[in-house]
């Protein structure tokens, strides 16, 4: 049975995106939430971010204008997080 896993990203963006893309191999549903910051322009972050997008992960952010990420207000995120089996903060 597939589990629903949410990855919450504030710090360690490169590591969090890398882990998110690796978890997809387990056939679970992985959703990524970028909180309170823009995605860094750092090369390692961008490579792992692009990999997550290429693998079709759902990526949400509570920061308007965060490039190529669906905006979701913090209140909606809080409600959505109740649907997950696991929540992994970074």
Image (cartoon, rainbow, N blue to C red):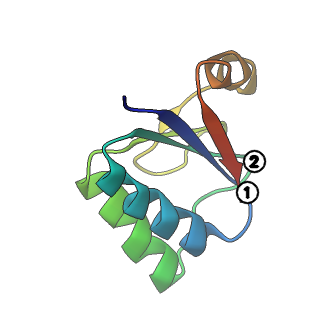
Which residue lies at the image location 63% right of the left edge and 38% below the top edge? 86
Pointers 2 and 1 in contact (C-beta within 8 Å) = yes
Helix, strand or loop at label 1? It is loop
Q: Would you call the spot at circle 2 few (<14 residues within 10 Å), some (14-19), or many (20 or more)?
A: some
Where is 6 relative to 34, above or below?
above
Q: Which residue is mark 1?
A: 10
Where is 63 relative to 38, above or below?
above
Q: Nearer the viewer, mark 2 or mark 1?
A: 1
Judge by depth and name the residue closer to the eye, 53 or 64.
Answer: 53
Q: Would you call the spot at circle 1 few (<14 residues within 10 Å), some (14-19), or many (20 or more)?
A: some
Q: Which mark is residue 21?
A: none
List x then y, in percent, for residue 18. 47, 69
Which residue lies at the image location 75% right of the left edge and 19% below the top edge? 75
Considering the image in quadrants, where does the N terminus appear? top left
List x then y, in percent, for residue 69. 45, 43
Disc 2 versus disc 1: distance between alpha carbons? Answer: 7 Å
Q: Is residue 22 left or right of residue 63?
A: left
Q: Which residue is mark 2?
A: 36
Judge by depth and name the residue closer to the eye, 47 or 67.
Answer: 47
Judge by depth and name the residue closer to the eye, 86 or 52.
Answer: 86
List x then y, in percent, for residue 9. 66, 54
Report the label total.
2
One can see residue 64 in this view:
yes
Which residue lies at the image location 53% right of the left edge and 39% below the top edge? 5
List x then y, in percent, for residue 10. 73, 57
């Amino acid at each position: 049975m597939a589990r629903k896993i949410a990855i919450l990203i504030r710090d360690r963006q490169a590591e969090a995106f890398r882990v998110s893309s690796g978890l997809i191999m387990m056939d679970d549903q992985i959703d990524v939430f970028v909180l309170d910051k823009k995605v860094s322009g750092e090369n390692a972050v961008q490579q792992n971010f692009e990999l997550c997008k290429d693998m079709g992960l759902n990526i949400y952010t509570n920061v308007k204008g965060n490039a190529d990420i669906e905006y979701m207000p913090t209140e909606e995120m809080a409600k959505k997080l109740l649907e997950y089996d696991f929540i992994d903060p970074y």
